[in-house]
């Protein structure tokens, strides 16, 4: 890693304006549920991960697209407040910004619907505009909320400069060999791992460990999260380890995966070994799920967790 690129995380991905609804439960088909309240939040997997990387101390930059609307202006302002470089977030005239509605139940779990909007306009023009940034990037983060061809173009441009490409393969969808061949590390949860690996995955630490082993057949390295049980790592060299989840009182799981990914990328970008980077990401996610939404902009504390190696 060169001195010029040390610490720079570039996120190529989605920006959504989220509406968060608190309710006793999520509605079934045809059912209306009376909620307790709602609040807006700037999100999208790409935006969330860019903010997480910045919170974790990395120089963070966002490459994306918003609409020429109030949601787009709010998303840009949020990136600016959060010290994320947004020079390469394009404002698309005549296009609505991406948005989502997430409904949280009494247990802190949620279901969401996203409308991609301007995120679907991302492509090679955005990659070309950010060529200078990508040449200085240590870690490039990708997700599956933008067109596949755009991810391929971004990964190819970053790899040309020796950048580490990390794909958070969410939401799950089939991935072409052209993209998988450019990815250095894939990160999934149990559901996404089951889709990509083509095998049943039990949402436990043991299940995550086996899924990571299967994914490492296709990718140089794989990380599979298992929610409240922990996270597992496996690579093609046969190196494997697992971290148990850090016990916390869960307030909301919203954004936990993105917090993990952004914190992991930040640690990698500052030269941390993979094991230490995953431990830092595990701690960041634990802190997030135990923090109310209204308090999530306060400076993070440190939570420590141990590493457990499979037999």
Image: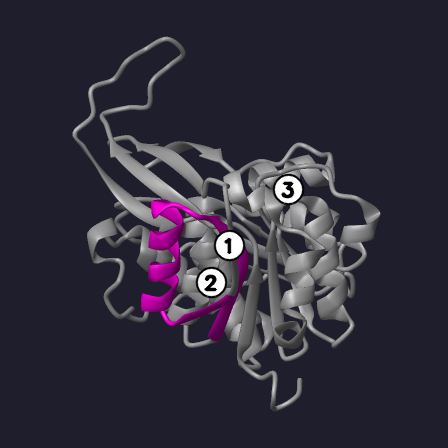
Name the residue tied to disc 3. 193
Mark 2 lies on a secondary structure that is helix
Name the residue tied to disc 2. 50
For the point 26% across and 62% down, the residue is 297
Taking 300 as reference, is 142 left or right? right
Q: Quadrant of the N terminus?
A: bottom right
Where does the magenta region start and end?
59-87
Q: Is residue 218 visible?
A: no
Where does the image place residue 130, in percent across and percent down from the top left? Answer: 63, 68
Taking 96 as reference, is 168 left or right? right
Q: Is residue 60 magenta?
A: yes
| Depth check, front residue: 269 or 209 | 269
Q: Is residue 219 visible?
A: yes
Where does the image place residue 204, in percent across and percent down from the top left? Answer: 52, 42
For the point 20% across and 52% down, the residue is 294
Where does the image place residue 98, in percent across and percent down from the top left? Answer: 46, 42
Q: Nearer the viewer, mark 3 or mark 2?
A: 2
Between the C-alphas of marks 2 and 1, the distance is 6 Å
Mark 1 lies on a secondary structure that is helix
Residue furthest to the left in view is 36
Name the residue tied to disc 1. 46
Q: Earlier in the sequence, mark 3 or mark 2?
A: 2
| Colour theme | one colour
Between the C-alphas of marks 3 and 1, the distance is 20 Å
């Amino acid at each position: 890693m060169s001195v010029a690129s040390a610490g720079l995380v570039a996120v190529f991905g989605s920006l959504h304006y989220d509406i968060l609804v608190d309710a006793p439960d999520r509605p079934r088909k045809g059912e209306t549920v009376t909620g307790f309240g709602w609040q807006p939040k700037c999100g999208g997997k790409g935006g969330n991960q860019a903010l997480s990387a910045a919170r974790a101390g990395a120089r963070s930059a966002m490459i994306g697209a918003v609409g020429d609307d109030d949601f787009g202006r709010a998303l840009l302002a949020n990136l600016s407040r959060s010290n994320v470089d947004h020079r390469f977030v394009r404002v698309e005239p005549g296009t609505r910004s991406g948005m989502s509605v997430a409904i949280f139940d009494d247990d802190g779990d949620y279901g969401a619907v996203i409308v991609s909007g301007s995120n679907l306009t991302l492509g090679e023009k955005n990659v070309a505009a950010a060529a200078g940034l990508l040449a200085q990037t240590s870690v490039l983060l990708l997700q599956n909320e933008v067109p596949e061809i755009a991810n391929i173009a971004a990964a190819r441009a970053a790899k040309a400069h020796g950048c580490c490409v990390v794909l958070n393969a969410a939401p799950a969808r089939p991935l072409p060999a052209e993209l998988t061949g450019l990815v250095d590390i894939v990160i999934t949860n149990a559901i996404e791992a089951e889709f990509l690996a083509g095998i049943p995955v039990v949402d436990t630490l043991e299940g995550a460990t086996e899924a990571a082993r299967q994914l490492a057949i296709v990718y140089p390295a794989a990380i599979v999260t298992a929610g409240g049980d922990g996270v597992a790592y496996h690579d093609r060299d046969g190196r494997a380890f697992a971290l148990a989840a850090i016990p916390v009182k869960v307030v909301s799981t919203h954004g936990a995966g993105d917090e993990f990914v952004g914190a992991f990328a930040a640690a990698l970008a500052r030269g941390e070994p993979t094991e230490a980077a995953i431990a830092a990401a595990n701690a960041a996610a634990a802190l997030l799920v135990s923090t109310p939404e209204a308090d999530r902009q306060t400076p993070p504390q440190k939570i420590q967790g141990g590493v457990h190696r499979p037999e």
